Image (tube, rainbow, N blue to C red):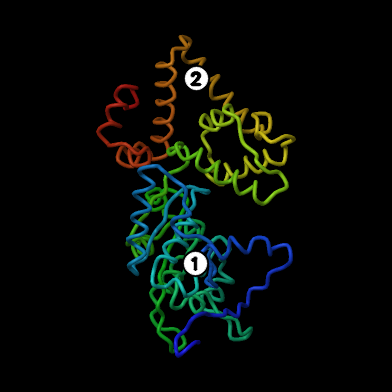
Amino acid sequence: MEHGKAIGAIEFSKHFYETKQIKYLDNFLGHKLYRDNHTTYRLEDYITTNAEMKTQLEKARRSAQKSAPVLLTGETGTGKDIIAQGIHNESERYTKPFITLNCSTLTEDNIFTQLYGSDNEAKSGKLQEANGGTLLIDHLNLLDISLQAKLLHAVDIKVLNGEPLDIRYITTVNEDVDKLLAEKRLREDLFYRLNVLQIDLPPLRLRKEDIPLILDFYIQFYNEHTLQKNVSYCNEVIQLFYAYHWPGNVRELKNALESAYNNLLGDEILVEHVPERIKKNVQHSTQSIMQNNQSGHLRDLTEAYERQIIAEKLRETDGRLAETARRLGISRQLLKYKCLKYELL
């Protein structure tokens, strides 16, 4: 203080930095939301130029200003954790805890303790830990149907141990929700309770224009945090990555790049450094398309690949045109035209 005015501040942090972590302090200090709320990401950390993904990000930003439950859908590796943390950090709850309840670990024996805690062990439950903040119900589709009623009861609780509960619920699933409901693997009452706002993250194969951006980001990251500096990649690598379908999405792309770094001898990533499974998959797909299109004309090859993608999506959605169009990022009318053209209907 100086003359009755605050001119500076000192933070007494409980975070202990080991010697090897000191060099990363600049990154932490530059992250304005690096606080003790158990988060790492903001919405601006999501890397994309894809129009559909930008729409979903805008929905996430709007939802941050509300307290209604949010359901995040998307395949494994699409970045649902970034969106969930980002919503929390752009809300008024950002100084409060962000707590994760991993449904894949819940059983009949431990679900009560996980939710409500244990008096015998003086252990608090997830509800108490998340009070005032956000509870991420992660991988809801992996929670056994027999336990979902207990989760629904917990979500509806407004008072715990005599104290009011104020929790923002964000839920993730990595499967199609319509399929989960149809197969009776997801209770409808729980689904409607947690799905007031829905945000759908498209897979990487439907936003391949983001691949160079994501590559550049992780290249810079590994250049800064490994002994290998100024590493780049050749044009053949980006072409290979465009041709691959990325079932593991961005997480798999990061893994492929990390693998390439570990195989690298010089300062340029070549095709030979890319994991074999990616090269073999692309080679197999190309051979299949060529066998079905002996002419080799670019138009024929492009149409064959497009037909293959649409057919795959139709199988995933059990032929539902509206859902297939949504996943492909095109209108229902355009999808129907292409289905008739390729004799898929």
Q: Identify residue type, mark 2.
A: Ile
Q: Measured from the top left, where is residue 11 in percent x and y?
A: 57, 79
Q: Measured from the top left, where is residue 160 in percent x and y?
A: 45, 84
Instruction: Report the Cα–Cα distance between label 1 and label 2.
Output: 48 Å
Q: Measured from the top left, where is residue 31 in percent x and y?
A: 52, 63
Query: In percent of the image, x 52 and y 74: which residue is there?
Result: 126
Q: Measured from the top left, where is residue 71 in percent x and y?
A: 39, 59
Q: Reply above or below: 41 against 228.
A: below
Left or right: residue 186 versus residue 254 is left
- Ranked by sequence position, the earlier of labels 1 and 2 is 1
Query: In percent of the image, x 38 and y 74: which residue is there?
Result: 156
Choose top left, top right, bottom left or bottom right for residue 188: bottom left
- Residue pointed to by mark 2: 289
Q: Residues within 10 Å of mark 1 (few under 14, many from 20)?
A: some
Q: In the rendered view of the protein, which quadrant contains the C terminus?
A: top left
Q: Identify residue type, mark 1.
A: Leu
Do callouts 1 and 2 mark residues in contact (Cβ within 8 Å)? no
Viewer-proximal residue among 105 and 309: 309
Left or right: residue 336 versus residue 161 is left
- Residue pointed to by mark 1: 33
Q: Secondary structure at mark 2?
A: helix
Q: Reply above or below: 296 against 268.
A: above
Q: Reply above or below: 281 against 200.
A: above
